Image (cartoon, helix red, strand yellow):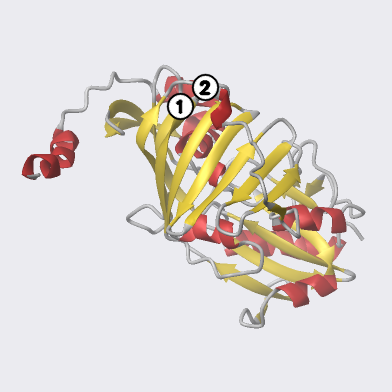
Amino acid sequence: MAVLAAVPAVVGALPVRATAVEPDQLAAAIVGSTNAPYQGYVETRGQLAIPDLPDVDTATALLGGPAKIRVWRASPVAWRADLLNPTGESDTYGDATGTWTWDSTDRRVSRIEQAPGDVRLPRPADVVPPELGRRLVDGAAPGELQPLAPARVAGRSVPGLRIVPADPVSTVDHVDVWADAVTGVVLRVAVVSRGADRPVFESQFLDVSLSRPADNLVTFVRPTGVRNRRNQSTDLLQQLRSITSSVQLPASLAGLARAPGQTGGIATYGDGFGVVTVIAVPSFLISDAIPSTFPLTDRPWGGQARVVETQLVNAMAMSSGSLGYVLTGAVTVAELDRVAAVINQVRPGQ
């Protein structure tokens, strides 16, 4: 038993022998890893004090605390991520048109049809290292990449790179990423916010295989005797999409371009680490959905808004005319105020 107890310390003390890889080369491998298969066990740890809000409990749990995830990925249209908890698990299967979610605790199944470019809440598959790391690296400019010493992750010695965002409105100080140099599959991600001395979010494999999982592991088979979830959409933004379908946000806002392919009242503006998500809904929904514990505050642009601040992600809810707007992103509150001032003036979508 003493020998077994010493194994983790011995493994951690083994020398790191990963071959040095230039940051731009490693970044190219990571961005190109979309079709690379993998499977393994992931642990994440978030320290974002996100308040509890209706229908966003999974996203809140993923970003605000520890999580344990088993993941299998055969391809972008054949994958599975199981979010484990003390009483059961919630399994999500992805295919070409959306996802199936099976909750073993309440024995209910839900289906979400979703286009690839749709804005949605984070789900377990989004925070595993390969997916999170690839999106962060893909959003980095070449001048934001720096070399990083290799590390041992899940028993593998792998090279790393650091992203230091140049955009002053970003709340991200730097992101450290370690990945398999051959496949580009990211094995560990650590995000550090401005002014922090330790990561506010970490995700890493404790056990990983870079082999393709068997088809039966990533194919959803409906269990017998289960019911559909009463509200099939477990994603709040998916529910809002039908409400906001008649609202058309502009192609650009406050000098920021809308992401291509997005329509309706939910869109992202900007690029890199300065992206702001804007959601336009009937104004009464803002007051009905947001608890009064978030007081209205006077803003520098002359109106009032409810503001939620964390170390990494900030949000602002405001009403202007017949619509209410929610702005959020890993950007400063000052940047949200800048965009809100334009919204208050032009009232997009009305």
Q: Could you say whether the residue bearing mark 2 is in a helix, strand or loop?
A: loop
Q: Residue 16 appears in which quarter of the rendering?
A: top left
Q: Residue 196 appears in which quarter of the rendering?
A: bottom left
Q: Which mark is residue 204?
A: none
Q: Which mark is residue 185?
A: 1
Q: Could you say whether the residue bearing mark 1 is in a helix, strand or loop?
A: loop
> Residue flagged by tag 1: what amino acid is it?
Val
Residue density around tag 2, few if under 14, some if 14–19, many if 20 or more, within 10 Å: some
* Residue furthest out toward the front: 225
Q: CA distance from mark 2 to mark 1?
A: 7 Å
Between residue 95 and residue 59, name the one nearer to us: 95
In the depicted structure, whether residue 66 falls above or below residue 22: below
**Mark 2 highlights which residue?**
36
In the depicted structure, whether residue 74 falls above or below residue 88: above
> Residue flagged by tag 2: what amino acid is it?
Ala
Q: Earlier in the sequence, mark 2 or mark 1?
A: 2
Residue pictured at 43% horizontal, 31% vertical = 186
